[in-house]
Image (cartoon, rainbow, N blue to C red):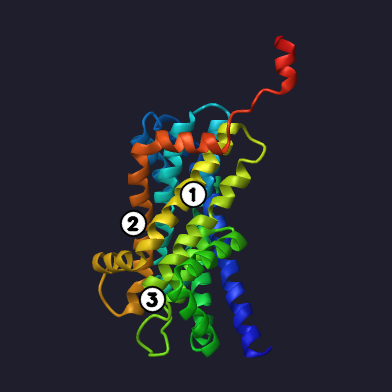
């Protein structure tokens, strides 16, 4: 197997481990706490602020904004909560999902195999379903970081390739191109957490000077914005065949992320400078993973603060996008 094919297969294998670990962890957490989280969503959506907090909490616990979004769409479809309540949950889910990037920014390289072994032992030695779910969650957490470690180990040769460096320079200099790349990555992988993990890992590679990041924070932010746009496809698919308000909830998720992208794309460099100011200091390749996680969190918190008082406007926008069904001509004839 030649070097290029070995690098690509290593990267894809690492990505597969990460996505599998992420999905397994999310499923086990949903088994362990899914019903409780559903009850929290029902109870804590009385007002927009509480709805946002509920959405953020449920997503942070379940480690899946998709799960929270699908719950909200299901509740709206069943008329358990109203459209404005569902939108507030969606806003919160976008904040909660940033916890994954924050966790990934921690360096667990020295503890991966201990985590895997601990999870494996609990999983196979436990007698109850709840304990087995805990063991599986810990094991999946280890798989997640093992996938990241594998991807990181095979990315370095890519970072030294002149052709690849030229492509990255184009993305860094043209923010819109970065948005397109991020969107396509998430549409293909079907996991914004996975694509952000890839982004964090790749940005941690050194560039040609052997010191700075190959991508830099200003180059990573447009890709991050694209990741947020790409993740809306899950909500759109989940709303297919559901009620109009369910479709409007999915549309609200799209409006939130697309409006944020259109706003922040004009301020990439000032935004990057702000994130660098509030993030840990040190060599760029050592801190950029945390900077990307912080950029993700700040973006979603800022957009949520903008949209909370404008939920009424969001309702009007999504109602315009998916209007009420107009009566057919035959209905008018029957009333005459």
Residue underneath mark 3: 216
Viewer-side residue, 287 vs 123: 287
Q: Crowdedness of circle 2 by 10 Å Cα count: few (<14), some, many (20+)?
A: some
State the image coordinates of residue 50 (x, y, percent, origin top left). 35, 35
Question: Of the numbered discs in the image, which one, if any, rests on residue 210?
Answer: none
Question: Of the numbered discs in the image, which one, if any, rests on residue 65?
Answer: 1
What kind of element bears circle 1?
helix
State the image coordinates of residue 125 (x, y, percent, origin top left). 54, 56
Among the 4 quarters of the image, the one containing residue 294:
bottom left
Answer whether residue 204 is visible to the viewer in this image. yes
Viewer-side residue, 16 vs 177: 177
3 or 2: tag closer to the N-terminus: 3
Which mark is in front, 1 or 2? 2
Residue underneath mark 2: 298
Q: Residue at x 51, y 69 (%)?
A: 177
What kind of element bears circle 2?
helix
Which mark is in front, 3 or 1? 3
Q: Residue at x 46, y 42 (%)?
A: 90
Q: Residue at x 43, y 58 (%)?
A: 100
What kind of element bears circle 3?
loop
Q: Residue at x 38, y 90 (%)?
A: 209
Q: Crowdedness of circle 3 by 10 Å Cα count: few (<14), some, many (20+)?
A: many
How many labels were placed on the picture? 3
Viewer-side residue, 46 vs 25: 46
**Inter-mark Cα distance, 3 to 1:** 27 Å
3 or 1: tag closer to the N-terminus: 1
């Amino acid at each position: 197997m030649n070097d290029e094919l070995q690098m690509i297969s290593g990267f894809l294998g690492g990505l597969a481990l990460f996505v599998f670990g992420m999905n397994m962890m999310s499923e086990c957490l949903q088994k362990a706490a899914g019903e409780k989280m559903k009850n929290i969503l029902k109870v804590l959506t009385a007002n927009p602020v509480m709805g946002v907090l509920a959405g953020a909490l449920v997503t942070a616990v379940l480690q899946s904004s998709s799960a929270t979004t699908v719950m909200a769409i299901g509740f709206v479809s069943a008329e358990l909560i109203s459209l404005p309540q569902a939108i507030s949950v969606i806003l919160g889910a976008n904040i909660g999902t940033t916890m994954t990037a924050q966790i990934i920014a921690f360096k667990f390289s020295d503890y991966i195999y201990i985590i895997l072994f601990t999870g494996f032992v609990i999983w196979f030695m436990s007698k109850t379903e709840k304990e087995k779910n805990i063991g599986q969650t810990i094991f999946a957490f280890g798989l997640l970081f093992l996938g990241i470690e594998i991807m990181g180990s095979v990315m370095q040769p890519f970072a030294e390739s002149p052709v690849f460096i030229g492509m990255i320079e184009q993305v860094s200099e043209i923010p819109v191109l970065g948005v397109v790349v991020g969107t396509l990555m998430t549409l293909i992988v079907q996991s914004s957490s996975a694509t952000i993990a890839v982004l964090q890992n790749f940005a941690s590679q050194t560039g040609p000077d052997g010191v700075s990041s190959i991508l830099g924070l200003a180059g990573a932010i447009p890709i991050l914005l694209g990741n947020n746009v790409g993740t809306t496809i899950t909500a759109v698919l989940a709303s297919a065949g559901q009620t109009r308000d369910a479709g409007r909830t999915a549309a609200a998720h799209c409006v939130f992320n697309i409006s944020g992208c259109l706003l922040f794309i004009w301020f990439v460099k000032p935004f990057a400078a702000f994130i660098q100011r509030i993030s840990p200091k040190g060599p760029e390749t050592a801190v950029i993973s945390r900077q990307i996680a912080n950029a993700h969190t700040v973006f979603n918190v800022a957009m949520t603060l903008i949209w909370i008082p404008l939920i009424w406007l969001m309702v009007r926008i999504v109602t315009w996008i998916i209007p009420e069904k107009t009566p057919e001509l035959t209905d008018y004839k029957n009333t005459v």
